[in-house]
Image (cartoon, helix red, strand yellow):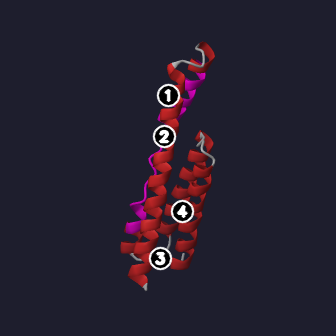
Amino acid sequence: MTLETIHKYLKYISNECDRHLRDKEVSYDEINQLSIELERFIDMVNESELSKETKSLINKLSFKTDNKDIRKSWIKNLINSLLLNDESPTNISYYNTQKSRTEDLKKLKNDVSNLSLKLKIKYQ
């Protein structure tokens, strides 16, 4: 893997974050897919012949996705929406879940942009 490939992949992840944020609703599938992409990218970097320092910088990328919590919140929202009316705390829970997912995506996008900039400065 080359630095150019890394920059392209980081740009791709950043674009995916933007795309999901524009939707104004971040689904479990979108979070899960992005998490898998990031893990795949980090695995490819670790298997490459890049310097340990570069690998270390990239390995610091993290995307807080506890799939168990995501599934729980989704199931909880579904049950609450079936049992309660629209004025229930379910809406609050749903909006809190969306807010948390949105914040996580914004943080990932920021981390990816910062990493890309660090790599550009370091190797140019």
Residue 52, by quadrant, is bottom left
Mark 2 vs 3, N-terminal side:
3
Residue annotated with mark 2 = 99
Q: Residues within 10 Å of mark 3 (few under 14, many from 20)?
A: few
Callout 3–callout 4 Cβ contact below 8 Å: no
| Magenta highlight on residue 66 | yes
Kindly report the distance in space between the C-alpha atoms of the residues bearing marks 3 and 4: 14 Å
Residue annotated with mark 4 = 41
Number of the label disc, if any, that sits on residue 30:
none
Say whether residue 10 is left or right of residue 52: right
* Residue found at the very far front of the displayed protein: 87
Tag in front: 4 or 2: 2
Callout 3–callout 1 Cβ contact below 8 Å: no
Tag in front: 3 or 1: 1
Mark 4 vs 2, N-terminal side:
4
Q: Amino acid at mark 4?
A: Phe
Q: Amino acid at mark 2?
A: Lys
Callout 4–callout 2 Cβ contact below 8 Å: no
Which portion, as a residue range, is magenta? 57-79
Local secondary structure at mark 3:
loop
Residue 70: percent from left, percent from top:
51, 36
On-image quarter of the N terminus:
bottom right
| Magenta highlight on residue 85 | no
Residue 17: percent from left, percent from top:
56, 55
Kindly report the distance in space between the C-alpha atoms of the residues bearing marks 2 and 1: 10 Å
Residue annotated with mark 3 = 49
Residue 124, by quadrant, is bottom left
Which residue is rendered at x = 48% and y = 44% of the image? 65
Residue annotated with mark 1 = 93
Tell me if residue 118 comes above or below residue 13 in the rendering: below
